Image (spheres, coloured by chain):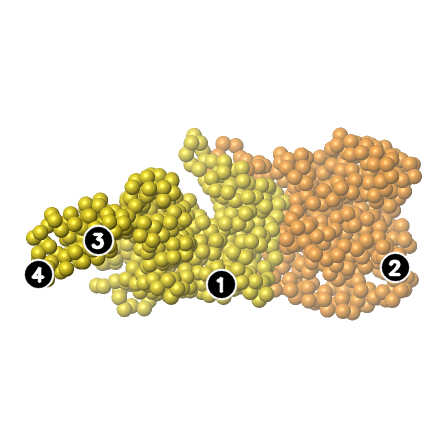
Chain colours: A yellow, B orange
Amino acid sequence: MEWEAVIGLEVHVSLSTQSKLFSGTASIFGADPNTEANIFDLAMPGTLPVLNEEALRMAVKFGLSIDAEIGKRSVFDRKNYFYPDLPKGYQVTQLDFPTVGKGSLTINLEDGSERVIGVTRAHIEENAGKSLHEDFHGMSGIDLNRSGEPLLEIVSEPEIRNATEAVAYLKKLHAIVRYLDISDAIMAQGSMRCDVNVSIRPKGETELGTRTELKNINSFRFVEKAINSEIQRQQDLLEDGGKVVQETRRYDAERDTSSPMRSKEFANDYRYFPEPDLLPVEIDDTYIEAVRATLPELPDARKARFVSEYSLSDYDAGVLTASREMAEYFEAVAKASGDAKLAANWVTGDLQALLNKNNWELTQSPIQADRLSVLIKRIIDNTISGKIAKTVFDAMLEDSASVDEIITAKGLKQVTDNGAIESLVDEVIANNPEQVQQFRDGKEQVLGYLVGQAMKLSQGKANPGQVNQMLREKMK
Amino acid sequence: MIEKTVAELYSALNSGEISSVELTQAYLDRINRYNETLNAFITVSDESALSKAKQADALRAKGDSSPLLGIPLAHKDIFCTEGVKTTCGSKILHNFISPYDATVVTRFNDAGAVMLGKTNMDEFAMGSSNETSYFGPVRNPWDTERVPGGSSGGSAAAVAADLCAMATGTDTGGSIRQPAAFCGVTGFKPSYGRISRWGMIAFASSLDQAGPICKSAEDAALMLNAMAGLDTKDSTSADVDVEDYTAGLDNSLEGLRIGLPRQHFAEGLSADVEQAVRDALRVYEKLGAELVDIDLPNNHLSVSAYYVVAPAEASANLSRFDGVRYGYRCEDPVDLEDMYKRTRSEGFGEEVKRRIMVGTYALSAGFYDAYYRKAQKIRRLIKNDFDAAFKDVDIIIGPTSPHTAFKLGAKTDPVAMYLEDIYTIAVNLAGLPGMSVPVGLADGLPVGMHMVASDFAEAKLLNVAHQFQKNTDWHRQRATAFTEGQ
């Protein structure tokens, strides 16, 4: 039987506000345990929440960027459960009236096609603290630094069909929140987290199958692996005449398997009710329009602009706009160098390869936009050839000197002097009488070989155009 | 001196008749003498009180004449006080020392008032007799075999026995007004949001409101002047201008329309209480007021609605008492669940546990619509009743409680105890200001009159109460057993 999967994602992103959602404590990643927790974060008796308006603004900004309905009246609710890293014994979240309602985003697939995935809602909620189970002699430690940090939980419609689309969806969300500058969205640090709902059904069937929820997935790659492994597990189960049980499963990336979480860990009646310590949040069109005015150019718009403004291919424009940093880097190089095509080639080619090889973020690259621009300028003004430029690029990794200094120091400057080229050409003609004759007999292809010989003689420094031209003249 | 009102003490302090240190010492002496009997205080902070009094005297010597400067007060033990034990009447907080001050506490500190200590209360303010306190029941100064009312019983008894000049209380369903009535003092519950809840340990967040317990309406106005106002630390605190609540106290009551809810003068009301209230109404008629019978048709639903909403909110508010970060923790827990279960089973008293269970049930999946949502709808109906009434009348008056103080241990049925607040609860559900003033004695026990005004009409309420007190002296009556040393 042929099966199809139905996938929905619940993505949590930490909003990069200065302070927590309901208290004035700073939210800083990596501080010493419990140093970023005030009396409210510790749920001292009598303390009360005050909404951080910046978190609301960020949520609205996100909503506008995915063309979502904005809740003019959002209501916070208490979600009740006991856990030591949840100091109040309830999490404040939004149940029936989230700040962001229905919206959608377009995902870009590797074959160049696009799909629109619906977003059900996005709501604001507070993060829990962290339980630390090691190094406490059989007891547990609690770190409340993270407790109360603002999260935006973005819930997709169950419209994703496979693992590849799920990753494309995540990458798009990642790009959007970073373009909006509302979250670092670093999966490895937990500032972007993802729970996956998966069910399968026979192809053509309209009823949904029983779904499972996968937790504990902390990279794009694991999302893909976890989904594929869960689809396979469900398929094996159903084909063997078994049944999928609705449950929450913990994904183990190391073993590429998942196992059911203990029912106690999730089977709760959360007893939601409106948080009486906070009034409903009312916003009007003026507020919404003011936030809209702060929206930056988003990935899709930027991609379209790169295609029209810089005559890039759809593919290149897509690659370059996948992250805000990459897009800004490219545009800086394109503008400073004056050649967008070359800039695009270098950024998507050598630079991207360098990042991939070293597993670097763009910000970690030793070659920043200004240096790459100079390198490209030197190609354009014939100081070096494109080929020599690769040598210079490699040298730039080791050497923080300027591009021009490197070219000079290494003697890589292109030879454009007619006299010097003429003597190169003469030498090549003298050394290759057979090929010269073939050319003269009309075998054009030999020219390439002869140019290559001249370039070799010059150690790559001769201007290939000039060599080409002079060879033709001399062999007339 | 100790029996004087805050307004009178102010004159005595200003004229140099007495110093704040002397006055503070006089109250501390009385606490020392009578607290063993009354059990009104959980914590007495004599040293810090005397040092604060000294500061007040020094400030006064420099020309400071703030209205509450040097006046000794007591805080209900529900208000967090930095460095001082704050128990909320519970074993689960019996050892809790607050790291911060409640806004109400800060405001009294800033006004120069002198805190004598923290008063006893029903555990987490859940009770109408002060018998649910982990620290034992408070006794009514008028008859120590009787309850002082609750939950602010310690504050009411302390004011009634002149163990302090004034006290703070909180009122979720009647917890200021009912003990004020039972102890023969003046108790005032402002509109919801009028006074910050920051640092006031939550029972039911949408109903809780702090207020004064004191010896006169004028004193209530003076206290309210210090307590009221927007607080950015409490999102539900109201951005409504604060008036000088003493300014309109002497306004004439000529033409005042007083509404008498038929539902409050009906079956269940004891005859002597009704008589005292009717006598008080005569006084108002003489002052030019007009009495109008009104209806609050949904009043009978208020206790039921309250006992869904309040426990529901409480069930979540009290989740933080889990033994993890502060307060009581059970001995040698074997695992997390054991720690939770035993800490909370051992740390909370019966009534608190009962309400947590009721609230948890009301919010459970499948019951939410039938209970919580329905209760919220009733709340709206009750508010509508009041809004309709206030289109016709300026003030609503009735009895505070159906009867006078009852004997300790007399009410063992929880529902009978819940019905204690039958006249006061609707006011909390509607968020309105209400107060209780003493209007007589029945068999030697004080009777309280309940007065309600529209949203944020605190000044009107105080004006109406003050005019009564100017023309009567019920608020000056004292229990003879505690009048020694006056």
Q: Are marks 1 and 3 on the same chain?
A: yes
> Residue visible at 70% across and 36% down?
B42
Please name the amino acid that badge 1 sits on.
Answer: Leu
Q: Residues under labels 4 and 2: Cα distance?
A: 122 Å
Q: Residues under labels 2 and 1: Cα distance?
A: 55 Å
**Rendered image: mark on residue A467:** 3
> What secondary structure is found at the residue carrying circle 3?
helix
Q: Which residue in the structure is indicated by mark 2? A: B251
Residue B433: horizontal and vertical position, in percent? 74, 57
> What secondary structure is found at the residue carrying circle 2?
loop
Q: Which residue in the structure is indicated by mark 1? A: A64
What is the chain identity of the residue bearing mark 1? A
Q: Residue most toward the front?
A: A419
What is the chain identity of the residue bearing mark 2? B
Q: Which residue in the structure is indicated by mark 4? A: A441
> Residue visible at 68% across and 67% down?
B384
Q: Of the residues under marks 1 and 3, which one precedes in the sequence?
A: 1
CB contact under 8 Å: marks 4 and 2: no
* B157 sits to left or right of A372: right
Q: Are marks 4 and 2 on the same chain?
A: no
Q: In the rendered image, which quarter is residue B322 located in?
A: top right
Q: Residues under labels 1 and 4: Cα distance?
A: 69 Å
What is the chain identity of the residue bearing mark 4? A
CB contact under 8 Å: marks 1 and 4: no
Q: The N terminus of chain B lies in which quarter of the figure?
A: top right
Frontmost of labels 3 and 2 is: 3
Residue B208: horizontal and vertical position, in percent? 67, 51
Residue B206: horizontal and vertical position, in percent? 64, 55
Q: Residues under labels 3 and 2: Cα distance?
A: 107 Å
Q: Residues under labels 3 and 4: Cα distance?
A: 20 Å
